[in-house]
Image: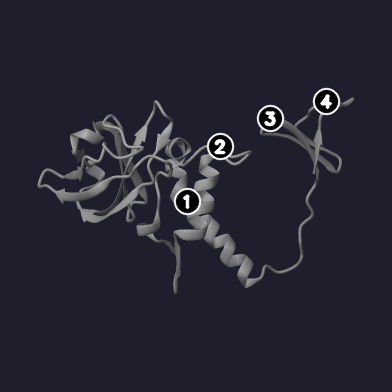
């Protein structure tokens, strides 16, 4: 692969003979047409592909959120790329039937803010989740106006829902209205705080699974 800065052709997109031109992160890239490998995929390679596919399918629905909450851009690596790397390393379990997410290790935010302290969750007959926590805004890197963020995921539906900004750290509670499509389902819940002024997020905490 080569980067094209200037030249008689300039930047181009598409295939010309054995060369493919494209634009990647603002740069014009030239690469040769890939050749198909006739070598069989090893068991280890297939496991890695299956693992990557599973993590990608899990995180893609909250890609926009993760780009706001999972650290900062590091070189060419976006917050979402960092989230993919973390979950590939830390949040996957291999079962006899294949890979699954280790929900207790899933993170929906990572950063330098002080995290949620002593959270509790109660389900209600009105299909809501009542979440409480201790106000720790007197601690370092914790502010009264930090916005509360909660994420829920229903494995049976393979769907997420999240809400942010309804409550602040100092409020010590929030009530999440669960979408009707989640009624009767088991959902996994994570919570954190964000601070838009400082562009910071706290590393999230897993709050458990509940039937709503």
Q: Mark 4 points at which residue?
A: 10
Disc nearer the start of the sequence (1/2): 1
Q: Is mark 2 on a helix, strand or loop?
A: loop
- Which badge, 1 or 3, comes first in the chain's sequence? 3
In the image, residue 32 lies at what x, y percent? Answer: 82, 45
What distance separates the C-alpha of mark 4 from that of mark 2?
29 Å
Q: Furthest-right residue in view?
A: 8
Report the residue marked by disc 3. Answer: 26
Q: Element type at marker 4?
A: loop
Residue 73, labelled with which disc? 2
**Distance of label 3 from label 2 (alpha carbons):** 15 Å
Q: Earlier in the sequence, mark 4 or mark 2?
A: 4
- Nearer to us: label 1 or label 3: 3
Q: Which picture quadrant has residue 5? A: top right
In the rendered view, tell whether residue 174 sits above or below residue 50: above
For the N terminus, the image quarter is top right
Task: Give neighbour class at mark 1: few <14, some 14-19, many 20+ (Cα, 10 Å).
Answer: few
Query: In the drawing, does residue 20 fall left or right of residue 44?
Result: right
Q: Mark 1 points at which residue?
A: 57
Q: Residue furthest bottom?
A: 96
Residue at image coords 63%, 38%:
75
- Measured in 3D between alpha carbons, the distance from the residue under mark 1 to the one under mark 3, in whole angstroms, is 26 Å
């Amino acid at each position: 692969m080569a980067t094209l800065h200037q030249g008689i052709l300039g930047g181009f997109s598409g295939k010309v003979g054995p060369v493919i031109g494209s634009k990647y992160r603002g740069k014009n890239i030239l690469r040769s047409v890939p050749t198909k490998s006739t070598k069989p995929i090893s068991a280890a390679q297939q496991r890695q592909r299956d693992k990557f596919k599973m993590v990608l399918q899990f995180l893609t629905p909250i890609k926009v959120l993760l780009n706001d909450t999972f650290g900062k851009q590091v070189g060419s690596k976006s917050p979402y790329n960092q989230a993919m790397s973390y979950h590939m390393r830390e949040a996957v379990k291999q079962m006899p039937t294949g890979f699954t997410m280790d929900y207790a290790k899933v993170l929906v935010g990572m950063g330098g803010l002080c995290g949620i302290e002593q959270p509790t969750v109660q389900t209600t007959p009105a299909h809501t989740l009542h979440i409480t926590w201790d106000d720790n805004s007197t601690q370092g890197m914790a502010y009264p106006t930090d916005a509360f963020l909660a994420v829920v995921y229903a494995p049976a539906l393979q769907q997420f829902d999240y809400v942010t900004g309804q409550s602040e750290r100092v409020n010590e509670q929030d009530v999440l209205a669960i979408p009707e499509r989640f009624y009767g389902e088991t959902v996994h819940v994570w919570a954190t705080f964000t601070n838009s002024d400082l562009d910071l997020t706290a590393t999230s905490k897993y709050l458990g699974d509940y039937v709503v």
